[in-house]
Amino acid sequence: MRRVVFNQKGGVGKSTITCNLAAIGAIEGRRTLVVDLDPQGNSTRYLLGASAEDIEAGAADFFEQTLKFSVRPKTTDDYIVETPFEGLHLLPSQPALEELHGKLESRYKIYKLRDALAALDGDYDAIWIDTPPALNFYTRSALIAAEGCLIPFDCDDFSRRALYALMENVQEIQADHNPALKVEGIIVNQFQPRANLPQRTVQELVDEGLPVLEPYLGASVKVKESHERALPMIHLDARHKLTQEFVALHAALDAARPGKRKAR
């Protein structure tokens, strides 16, 4: 299953959600790949820690190869690295992604990621794609490559207003490039159950019939410690309330997935 975590708004938790759900799948025995397409590289640093500075190949090298002809091109596996967590691999971000964007867009390499990840379906039980906070070449490539789309939502009015345009953009990609793409749901992040505004905002989404997923992910300073120590929550504190919310969310997504494969 190939999933993209996408929102054009920054700071909504895309990398945190991507890495934590991927880490849970890996710890449950699923061979898992995270693809980091954001030039900021938050998922890469989250999973690799200080060693993120030492990567020799990654997503930028993969895309750069698509701009050239090679008699013996490298395989996608050549750009994938192991993380410290068993069963969890990473196609890491590189700052050069920013520089390559214009060339890739002008040369219309929009389907290259889809083809590369489809070829890896037999090697991985789950592929998670983290995206930059913009509707650009990389996010479009990810939406074209994915089967499922998860949309983080951080419970404010600006996010709600942006959500409708975001859904339209996903539907446009679905209609024009990827009819197999499904919006699996909206992930409510940084939820504060005792505050009136988050409760009211989320309830309005539910009342409108939007696919809001449960459980909602609560706010916790433990996440910042998780980032600092480069340990997804399941490895930092498996009993923490937020960790258990991630586990329950992963289980809900897994249960809803058609034709799911058993963990190896």
Image (cartoon, grey):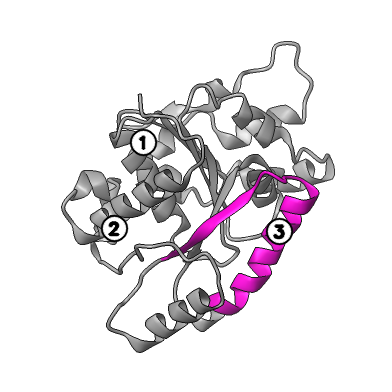
Q: Earlier in the sequence, mark 3 or mark 1?
A: 1
Residue in the image at 41% along x and 44% along y: 254
Residue 50 included in the magenta stretch of the image: no
- The residue labelled by disc 1 is 51
Residue 77: which quarter of the image? top right
- The residue labelled by disc 3 is 171
From which residue to which does the magenta span run?
Answer: 159-188
**For residue 39, above or below residue 112:** below
Q: x, y (%) of residue 30?
A: 37, 31
- The residue labelled by disc 2 is 245
Name the residue type under label 1. Answer: Ser
Q: Nearer the viewer, residue 93 or 192?
A: 192
Name the residue type under label 3. Answer: Gln
Specify few, some or many for label 3: CA neighbours under 10 Å numbering under 14, 14-19, or 20 or more: some
Instruction: Name the element at disc 1.
Output: helix
Residue in the image at 47% along x and 57% along y: 14
